[in-house]
Image (tube, grey):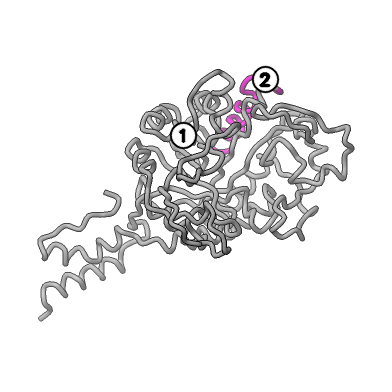
Amino acid sequence: MKTPILGALAIGILALAQAPASAANYNTLDGSAPLVIAHRGASGYLPEHTLEAYAKAIQLGANFIEPDLVMTKDGVLIARHEPMLDGTTDVATKFGVDRKSTRLVDGVSTTAYFASDFTLAEIKTLRAVQPRANRDQSFNGQFSIPTLDEIITLAKAQSLATGRTVGIYPEVKHGTFHDSLFGNKTFENKLVSTLHAAYGNSASAPVFIQSFEVGNLKYLNGQTDIRLVQLVDADDVNADGSMSLVDPYRQPYDVQLAGGTTTFADLVTPAGLAAIKTYADGVGPWKPYLVTTVADGVDRDGNGQITINDRRVDGSTGVIEAAHALGLVVHTWTFRNDASGYGFADPKAEMAYYMQLGVDGVFTDFTDTGVAAVSSVPEPGTWALMFGGIALLAGRRLRNRAD
């Protein structure tokens, strides 16, 4: 005859074997696995914001692909990280310097080839290049610049081909900048009409819309039920672990232009998060906002120097917990295999750490590392199921880490 403890363990193991994968309970807002969001596509491997980079990210297991959006001269939404084309395309080899212009971007005077000075037909003559010198340059000049419509078509086709939903996570790049060129909220209206035509006006659509500005998200909140995310920026991390806030990373540009005093750091205070809850469904802070770090003199990245990247990570700042208490999802950025993370030398371990703290999604240039990180995170609901019988016999109740 089995002892009661062994019997309980056997029952727990049997239940574990029969439980569906959805029974796993992570520390995320809803208990599901954290999302892997392909930052500019699989941009660690291929030139960013191309259909090929998005397709590779989907192949590697991305839940969402992220197109940063800007607008062409003839009002078409295309995927580029910035309105300036210089660093990510071969525009300088195909158009003369007379096509450059000087414009204010978040208050900074910038001379460049701007997408808004080119028609879509002209944009389609360009080819993407890898902007990071330390990454593979062999694909430069091969891939064209996609439109939002083309990205949606790809995501839907791949959803059917893979049998899993692939979402899109568009960012409104520099809303105030586009307002000055095309008229108030022309960009946002175009985005909403495109998304509604493709996915419907629903919070259950596989779409998040993100922005570093506040006013356009408040406007979008009145135009769509698609989920909205407030991004939170900073310039750097100070030596004492506090956030460095230097223009143009000190505060949302539309807030600055209106004479407001709210900084990005203010947005992740309890009052700031409560304000975000009134117009958005989630918050996207730069990852150092979420962890407490300490300088302890250890060379964690092994480069022979002690820098800010070597700071020891000592747990959550409480932002994740405060956001979850309000019902806001937390998606953080950006994780890269080829750039040191604060306090981490192993990129998979870095992402897994944030996932264990409870982030609901991570933006990464290396989708496969993000997928591996999700797989490496302990699933507390599963372990509680396995050992629950023993805990009950001992007169104790196991608490899920999400409590």
**In magenta segment, residue 188:** yes
| Residue 146 shown left or right of residue 239 in the figure | right
Read off the residue under disc 2.
Answer: 183
Classed neighbour count for the residue bearing mark 2: other residues with Cα under 10 Å, few (<14), some (14–19), many (≥20): few
Where 329 sits versus 15, above or below? above
Judge by depth and name the residue closer to the eye, 165 or 254.
254
Question: What is the three-letter code of the residue carrying label 1?
Answer: Ala
Q: Is residue 139 visible?
A: yes
**Principal SS element in the magenta part?**
helix
The quarter of the displayed image where residue 390 is located: bottom left
Please provide percent x and percent y for residue 234. 53, 38
Where 379 sits versus 157, above or below? below
| Residue 217 shown left or right of residue 402 in the figure | right
The quarter of the displayed image where residue 394 is located: bottom left
Q: Residue at x 49, y 63 (%)?
A: 372
Please provide percent x and percent y for residue 56. 63, 57
Read off the residue under disc 1.
Answer: 265
Give the magenta part as a residue range. 181-199
Question: What is the three-letter code of the residue carrying label 2?
Answer: Gly
Q: Residue at x 66, y 59 (%)?
A: 45
Please provide percent x and percent y for residue 107. 66, 26
**In magenta segment, residue 244:** no
Where 6 sits versus 296, above or below? below
Label 1 or label 2, whichever comes before in sequence order: 2
Please provide percent x and percent y for residue 309. 52, 54
Q: Which image quarter holds the N terminus?
A: bottom left
Judge by depth and name the residue closer to the eye, 391 or 100.
100
Q: Residue at x 41, y 27 (%)?
A: 275
Q: Secondary structure at mark 1?
A: helix
